[in-house]
Image: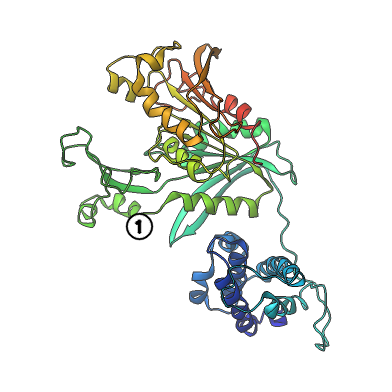
Amino acid sequence: MAALANGRAESAIPALQLALARYEGSYSEAHPRRAMARCVTGAALVAAGRGADAAPLLVPACDIHARWGLADPTVVAWGLRAVRASMSHLEEERRHGSTSPSNHGHPPSHHLLALPLLALTACGGDATAPGSGSTNTPCNPTPAVRNVPGSYSRTVTIGGVTREFIVYVGNSVGATSAAPVVFMFHGSGQSGPQFYNISRWKETADAHGLIAVFPSALTYCYKEDLNADGDMSDAGETTVETKWTSGRLNTAERPLCTAAEVATRPSAERALLAHPFQEDLAFVDSMLVALQAGFVVNAKRIHGTGFSNGAQFVTRLVAERSSVFASLHTHGGATEIVSTAARAISVNGSLGNMDQHIQEAYDIPALPMTQDMFTRYPGVKLKYVLPMLSMLRLQDVSTFQQSTMNGKLVSQWTWRTSAAGASNTFTFSLVGDNDHAYPNGILHPIVIAEPLWQFFSTQLLP
């Protein structure tokens, strides 16, 4: 195992693979120790020139360090330190006479405990292997994680598909201070770079010392029965654009184009469509791993906001990632999949009273800004409010208030009465004179990032 630290990775691989086998059988796919074991084994395989063998092991927890160069001993040292940390926990289990409940016939953890520890003896470990005659030698130090203000283009690879996102570290973020994070999910046909430029979350990050993340959705070719005539063959009912997997994509309601249909599209579109369908929750999970490994972030203060289709996707985060996000916000998008959130998370929703979808649905120029709006237009409540109340287990009892922001009226309803005895809330804001656009001071006088940050800053994971 000392060979790994000295660049002779091939000598270490058999022992690493034996240790990996224990992790593969004892922990779930998402367990961090399993990911770390895969990472260090993959790093050794790459260092030994066996990249093809390494590929299946390089899960996001290790993949994100590719920018350091996986053949670099620094990465190997990082992986070994991670394994040592997890083995310390396993040793603690052994001392107390217990092993992982998921061992299912595998040997107790201490039977393999020596393997990673021996690897450390020549690489900054805490002890020398008995009888080895060797002494500790320092590793190349793992690069210290620091926050450096600026923009960073990042990628993660999931199922062979490269996903892109921009990380912006605000000017006032401290180098070693754990910074809060805000994800900004764009709408259909849009991109992370576009919202990096127009959403005003970059400027808000500068002003308030946070990290803003701007991911990009994949491009899909899909069909939709827009005129409700029972088919999807009319003009305009086939679309090629970026789309988040908010719930209806790749279902009978919004099916993907067939391979034959894709083959008829222009070559530029075909290039963008050359990937399988991929659930974006996996993308979010991978970005979170990358952020926490590459930047100093406060894991209890991660928030998200979305516009239109991005807002629809955020409602999935409400239901399926409430244990990760401290709070969430949607603008101009409604829930597509209704299920109860695992945690009593607080959510804000907003909608322009001149949103084109509202105008088309009700044949009106604008929704009224009055308290009785939901009574006069119950379909708005049915679409934008009641599904969220169900997800958050809130009773339909609200308060109402109005305010003026940058000369524009905002009507606000807040639900606070929990059916589960929790303290979470849902606030729905109707933004005056706002159409289907994310308010950014240009498309609308209000810069919604500012009041949203005031909300996000009060929310913390337990």
- For the N terminus, the image quarter is bottom right
**Residue found 33% across the figure and 25% down from its top:** 357
From the image, tell me which residue sits under label 1. 276
Instruction: Give the amino acid type for the residue marked by disc 1 in the picture.
Output: Pro
Q: Is residue 133 left or right of residue 332?
A: right
Considering only vertical position in the picture, is 191 above or below 358?
below
Q: Is residue 279 left or right of residue 291?
A: left
Q: Nearer the viewer, residue 302 or 184?
A: 302
Q: Nearer the viewer, residue 35 or 4?
A: 35
Q: Is residue 356 left or right of residue 445?
A: left
Considering only vertical position in the picture, is 84 above or below 405?
below
- For the C terminus, the image quarter is top right
* Position of residue 50 measured from the top left corner of the image (x, y, whole percent): 53, 78
Quarter assignment of residue 200: top right
Q: Nearer the viewer, residue 356 or 367?
A: 367
Considering only vertical position in the picture, is 432 above or below 37?
above
- Can residue 427 be spotted in the picture? yes
* Position of residue 134 measured from the top left corner of the image (x, y, whole percent): 82, 84
